[in-house]
Image (cartoon, helix red, strand yellow):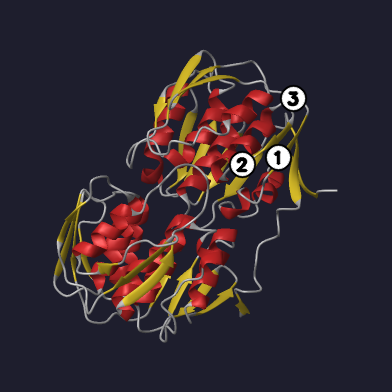
Amino acid sequence: MVSTSTATPLKTDDSYLRIQGGAILKGHLPVSGAKNSALAIMAGSLLSSEPCWIRNVPNLGDIVTMSRVLMALGVQVIREGADLWIDPTRITSHNAPYELVSQLRASFYVLGPLLARLGRARMPLPGGCNIGARPVDLYLKGLHALGAEVMTIDGGVVEAQCRRLKGARIYLDYPSVGATYTILLAGCLAEGETVIENAAREPEVIELANFCMSLGAEIEGAGTDQIVIQGKPRLTGTDYTVIPDRVEAGTLLLAGAITNSVITVGPVVVEHLSALLAKLREMGYEIELPATDTLLIRPGATRNGVDIETLPFPGFPTDMQSQFTALLAVAEGTSVVTETVFENRLGHVAELRRMGADIRVRGNHAIIQGVSHLSGAPVQASDLRAAAALTLAGLVAHGSTEVRGIQHLDRGYEQLELKLQAVGAKIQRLALS
């Protein structure tokens, strides 16, 4: 076993990707465990009074940061291969350190479990990708409805305390995934019944509920807009395996799509990708299912432009918008991308235009006129999914592309360049001089 504190991904703020575009890909692209599910489950492990094994956890920057947040609270975290052993038996602190929480928005998920276990919690406001405001007011309103006294946010710090949380009926003004996580986790140890109305329906919410039920929690309705939790006084340990990452799977499918290649991608949960697959078919791609957990993509006779609008699940995912924009940049005709979830998630457009894309931004709309080809250029990633989009663009661009800011990429994709190399992409990670 290796302590997570030493099992860290490659340091990437002093490196970049160089991509020679035009290679045709061939073979199978493996999908790692779901980062977003793993982060929520790691926070959820704080509910347990016994150790937990979490399997199929990708070794990513965000996972390491969350591990360090847990360790700062007194939790033992040990990595063995793709698995984490987490022992939250003795939580020694209710105070999460600013220098870690400021790096990762998902670290705020520990607020509910900390409050439920210890009766108090102190959390700085979270950080992460600069893609929009993403306020935490829904999280705090939910905890207040469960009986917590949420102190005034002072100097960017939230303090909350309670004797014991009590179940309540809570309506979310927006089906926020983070707020749903927070209330669901807190409700597991609250006294009585908690009902979340207008809950997020994302697969990661179902996954978190399944994890909590493996601890002994009683939850119904995950995956619908109403979740009912019967609180328990104590939860036990578990051995749980994380689902495949639907965003990584989608990104890898688009690597095949943008290069007009025939590749397989898996393992996947096909129903998690329904909106993306529908748009790929609408563009003219052929999608096959050679195995229950494997997708094959092949180019069709045409590559038509389409319109997309990001929406909460089961709509088109905001986490795939940047990558799909890169694909539409080389499609035929005009496409319109509408971003409704995060107001700053069109930052990749300027860099795609540097590569020759014809894209105009009007508010939260990107109007794309497909071009015959992109040209390699030095580009800078502004966030995680923008980094993925620029990598995809580099795969199809004429000439050489250098992608900087790949510390963002390594927050969400496990050894992406090695996976792409294995199917024929001409991509290298190089040190900055």
Q: CA distance from mark 3 to mark 1?
A: 15 Å
Q: Few, some or many C-alpha atoms within 10 Å of disc 2 (few <14, some 14-19, many ≥20)? A: many
The image quarter containing residue 44 is: bottom left
For residue 354, above or below residue 128 = above
- Do tag 2 and tag 1 residues touch (Cβ < 8 Å)? yes
Q: In the rendered image, which residue does mark 1 sit on?
A: 403
Label 1 sits on a secondary structure element that is strand
Give the x, y percent position of residue 344. 48, 36
Q: Few, some or many C-alpha atoms within 10 Å of disc 3 (few <14, some 14-19, many ≥20)? A: some
Q: In the rendered image, which residue does mark 2 sit on?
A: 387
Nearest-to-viewer mark from 3 and 1: 1
Q: In the rendered image, which residue does mark 3 sit on?
A: 398
Quadrant where the image shows the N terminus: bottom right
The image quarter containing residue 316 is: top left
The image quarter containing residue 87 is: bottom left
Q: Kindly identify the amino acid type of the residue bearing the numbered disc 1.
A: Val
Q: Kindly identify the amino acid type of the residue bearing the numbered disc 3.
A: His
For image coordinates 37% across by 33% down, the residue present is 340
Answer with mark 3 or mark 2, whichever residue precedes in sequence. 2
- Specify whether residue 183 is in view: yes
- Do tag 3 and tag 1 residues touch (Cβ < 8 Å)? no
Give the x, y percent position of residue 98. 52, 66
